[in-house]
Amino acid sequence: MTSTVSTTTGTDRAAEPRTGALDPELEQHRRELTGYCYRMLGSAFDAEDAVQETMVRAWRAQDRFEGRASTRTWLYSIATNVCLDSLNSRGRRARPMDLSSDPWQPVAGSLAASRGHESWVEPIGEAGVLADTQDPADLAVQRESIKLAFVAALQYLPARQRAVLILRDVLRWPAAEVADLLETTTASVNSALQRAHATLAGRPASIGEVFDPLNAEQRELLDAYVDAFQRYDMDALVALLHQDVTQNMPPYELWLEGPADVAAWMVGPGAACRDSVLLPVRASGQPAFAQYKPAADGTRRPWAVHVLEIRDGRIGALTTFLDTRLFAAMGAPDFLPAA
């Protein structure tokens, strides 16, 4: 590709700039690049690392950038190479239901197996990836493309097909521009896109309703969920669930299906969640809550992030991430004071 330069040098990393110390012309693209890398890698933390590596490589090579393409296109080229390198060195991220076609049984044994955080598709805070826009339709498209189900489906695609689909279908780049970025032909890009569509068509995945924070019906449902969970009223909670609701809880491999098994888990292995407090956060285009469990000193401490999917006016999926790193990434408090 004629518009890029090699950015892999032996520069001493002690001389690398920190976030915020880079050229403002580069920094203005950080948010959209983070969204792109998140869709590619399936992890907010991996995406942040990839974007920082992209910025450092660009900073090193600025004096050799010939300007034959825009700075934005140049940065996307670097980010794509960073992501492809990362994907070549590790396995695909997944959700628990991707590992087994059947729900976990028995519910009482659901905490028997777990995997490292690097195995799972993780949510991302919306503030770091959604572009500023006053267009509700454009915002809805952005939210759809960072939903957990969509990002999980992308992980089934080979890395270059994944890049093509994101650039063409999500970011709406022309095929010729994608071909230039990937140093290939337009025909090859169109072929890769067709193969990606065929793969995803074979793996249909519900991504629920479009989440609209201003939708009164959705707000009422979420308020009822918070109330039922904080009171730990399983009858009230079950009434909010879709008949084929699923629940999963990374890093554990379990996934459950149906209101009865969700309730059985809540009063069984999950009973320690009683007396928790939920605070709303914005994650992966879906309604989400930071859960704080009571501590011995009377405070409440970070425990999990709940990401919900709404379908047909009820909760169709509940994913609980037991990764307290997510709290800072989503702007949630470090703790809640004693009542």
Image (cartoon, rainbow, N blue to C red):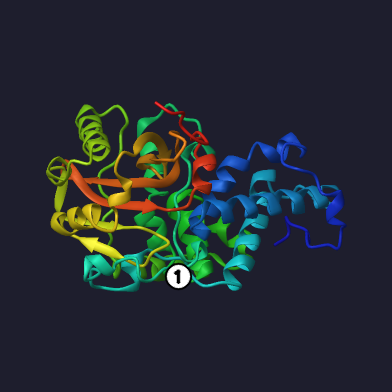
**Residue 263 in the image, given as x and y percentages of width and height:** 18, 53
Is residue 142 or residue 243 the one in the foreground?
Answer: 243
Q: Is residue 45 left or right of residue 199?
A: right
Which residue is painted at 53% across and 67% down in the image? 160
The amino acid marked with disc number 1 is Ser
Is residue 94 or residue 158 the one in the foreground?
Answer: 94
**Residue 297 in the image, given as x and y percentages of width and height:** 47, 36
Crowd rating for badge 1 (residues with CA inside 10 Å; few <14, some 14–19, many 20+): some
- For residue 134, what is the image quadrant? top left
Quadrant containing the N terminus in the rendered view: bottom right
Which residue is painted at 22% across and 41% down in the image? 232
Quadrant containing the C terminus in the rendered view: top left
In this rendering, the answer to whether 300 lies above or below 157 is above
Which residue is painted at 30% across and 73% down in the image? 100
**Residue 156 in the image, given as x and y percentages of width and height:** 41, 69
Q: Which residue is mark 1?
A: 191
Q: Is residue 59 left or right of residue 122?
A: right
Is residue 57 visible in this depiction of the protein? yes
